[in-house]
Image (cartoon, rainbow, N blue to C red):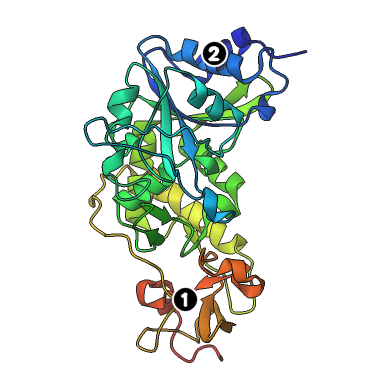
Amino acid sequence: MAVTKEQIVTDLAELGIRPGVTVMMHSSLSALGPVEGGAEAVVDALLEAVGSDGTLLVPAFRDSVWGDLSEFANSDCECTPEDGLCTSRQPGFQGVIPETVRRRQESLRSCHPTHSWVGLGKSARRLLEGHYRSPTPCGPGNPFELMDDDDCVLALGVMIDRVTLWHYYEEKQRVPYMGHFWPAERHLNNTVPGIRLQYQCPGILQEVCKAAGILRTGPVGKSSSGLMAVGDFKSFMATVIADDPHCMVLRPPDRDSDDFAVDTLRKAEGMLKAWRRGPVEPTETFYKSPQHVDPAGPADVVREDCPAFAGYHQAEDSQIPLCKANGRHPDFFRMGGVFDDYGLTTCGDCVWHESFPVDSYST
């Protein structure tokens, strides 16, 4: 039996969405099951759930850095500071529900080449018009900054590994592992360096947030969906990053293993212990400028004795040192082979290898 719009409205209310809030959503239509009226009915249900005073925000990301570079950014944006919004009609790559929102005549789009947001509702313009100032997708000026603590992040039929707010709080609190930066596209790839916990083990992070009490889950249609209050999410991230700035990235246990399960469980336990000690206010705000992540040169530190060192590998006319604890690099992975498995060494910015005395591992 098909899911109806009325059922979705009821399910959203039972999950915790109240009229008047802003909902920032990542979604999967197929996870809801067959929906009478399709994506249009889902969008109508969401707008009914937030009411005339509420707002719906969805991603219209063009980030295809791992795919066709011609689709990496909007090519038809004519944003001006006077308006602050994007005129691009190019689609995003986040599924049919966000695209249904984007195609609605009354929708507004923030101005960012790779990570624009689309909004419908009372506060859409206020939340979106400053994004053109942000030097990165999640930097100062993005819509997250203006959301109230009572506003919500909705994972509709998906797990919370899809939520972009992870990167916002990492960048705001200047974690030491910021990713590769493209100034022209204002793009920061948050998987370089570092194998990320939420991508490697999304179910673990989901359970951590549930155990911490910041994630409420329940059925919407035939899906399992999740809801977090912005204030709770903000406080949680401030607390766990203050306790361990590397809590969202994983490291292998030893030289001969690519198994990140041990560190995943250790990081999960650490987050919950930190949260149970009590919330901590964030102390940093966008101090660290994003930079390119380039191959290590002769003057750079390369810890060949570190358990994560993956050896030197030929790339065109250069020998590139790689790290099994860093995510693949967008400028090299197209070469295939080991470059599609490991990232560049970033030993000069990484404190993890300091746990291992020099010469404690053979090269």
Q: Quadrant of the N terminus?
A: top right
- Locate residue 4 relative to residue 294 in the image: left or right: right
> Measuring 52% from the left and 37% from the top, which residue is drawn there?
92
Measured as percent of width and height from the top left, residue 51 is found at: 42, 10
Secondary structure under tag 1 reads loop
Name the residue that disc number 1 marks. Answer: 345
- Locate residue 101 relative to residue 237 in the image: left or right: right
Q: Relative to the observer, which residue lies in front, 233 or 122?
A: 122
- Locate residue 317 relative to residue 237 in the image: left or right: right
> Measuring 51% from the left and 52% from the top, which residue is drawn there?
268
Measured as percent of width and height from the top left, residue 222 is found at: 69, 22
Residue 341 in view (yes/no): no
Measured as percent of width and height from the top left, residue 61 is found at: 48, 41
Quarter of the image for residue 262 reads bottom right
> Measuring 73% from the left and 20% from the top, which residue is drawn there?
34
> Measuring 58% from the left and 28% from the top, which residue is drawn there?
225
Residue 283 higher or lower than 40, as above or below: below
Mark carried by residue 164: none
Mark 2: amino acid: Ala
Q: Quadrant of the C terminus?
A: bottom right
Secondary structure under tag 2 reads helix
Q: CA distance from mark 1 to mark 2?
A: 47 Å
Mark 1: amino acid: Thr
Residue 277 higher or lower than 287, as above or below: above
Name the residue that disc number 2 marks. Answer: 45
Residue 191 in view (yes/no): yes
Precedes in sequence: disc 1 or disc 2: 2
Residue 362 higher or lower than 111, as above or below: below
Q: Relative to the observer, which residue lies in front, 61 or 238?
A: 61
Say whether marks 1 and 2 touch (CB < 8 Å).
Answer: no
Furthest residue to the right? Answer: 1
